[in-house]
Amino acid sequence: MSCIGVVLAGGLSSRMGTDKAKLQLGEQSMLSFSQDLLRRAGVDKVICSGENVGGIKDLYQQGGPLAGIYSVIKSERPQAILAIPVDMPFLTSKQLTELKLKGELSQRATYFNDSSLPVYLPVNALVSQYLEQEFSSSKFLTTGKGPSFKQVFKRCNALSLPLKDQQQLINTNTPEQFKQAQQILTKTRSNYV
């Protein structure tokens, strides 16, 4: 089954004050870092969700990460998606490879405990129809509040995997959090030199 890697980079980055995709993590941008992670995890193709990074424009603006995923599904018609947010500097390709493998073997949506993202999502009729129904519902059209991952996971009997080090799933939403992540990563790298 072919799997597309998706970097979710269509958010407003309002708390960060600047586009998270363009933040520098060492020698590369967060966008480039995220794309490299997906490639190393063995996806067939990497694309971005987010018009601001030259990716696929969200069909439903400010509909959250599932709006980005749904837009990719409508545009690319993939068999499966491995999606990550652009703001997880501690994420590794090893974790993504495990997530993808477990998802492929079980043919179920797969995520790590206590974190909706990253996610492996087989794109089947159940997922596609559910997202289409939710994004065209009167609730979404009046409130702008899209479906949650929790609802999607419940609907498709998702598989939740344990992860020993939850720090690896920390995302950075503010300049302070990103600076702290940079310091931790710099210190960690210098310990291995």
Image (cartoon, helix red, strand yellow):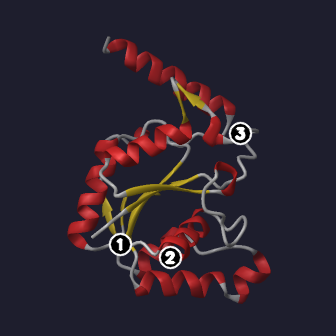
Image quarter of the N terminus: bottom left
Look at mark 1 in the image and give the residue it sits on: 158
Mark 2 lies on a secondary structure that is helix
Q: CA distance from mark 2 to mark 1?
A: 10 Å
Q: As shown in the figure, which amino acid type bears the numbered disc 3? A: Met
Q: Is residue 108 above or below residue 83?
A: below
Q: Can residue 20 be seen in this snapshot?
A: yes
Q: Amino acid at mark 1?
A: Ala
Q: Residue at x 72, y 88 (%)?
A: 138
The foreground one among 29 and 75 is 75
For disc 1, the neighbor class at 10 Å (few under 14, some 14 to 19, many from 20) is many
Answer with the quarter of the image where residue 75 lies. bottom right
Quadrant containing the C terminus in the rendered view? top left
Q: Which residue is mark 2?
A: 151
Q: Are marks 2 and 3 in contact (CB under 8 Å)?
A: no
Q: Earlier in the sequence, mark 3 or mark 1?
A: 3
Q: Position of residue 91 (x, y in %)?
A: 41, 41
Q: Secondary structure at mark 3?
A: loop
Nearest to N terminus: mark 2 or mark 1: 2
Residue density around tag 3, few if under 14, some if 14–19, many if 20 or more, within 10 Å:
some
Please state which of the two labelled residues, at mark 2 or mark 3, is closer to the viewer.
3
Q: Which residue is mark 3?
A: 16
Q: Relative to residue 184, is residue 175 depicted above or below?
A: below
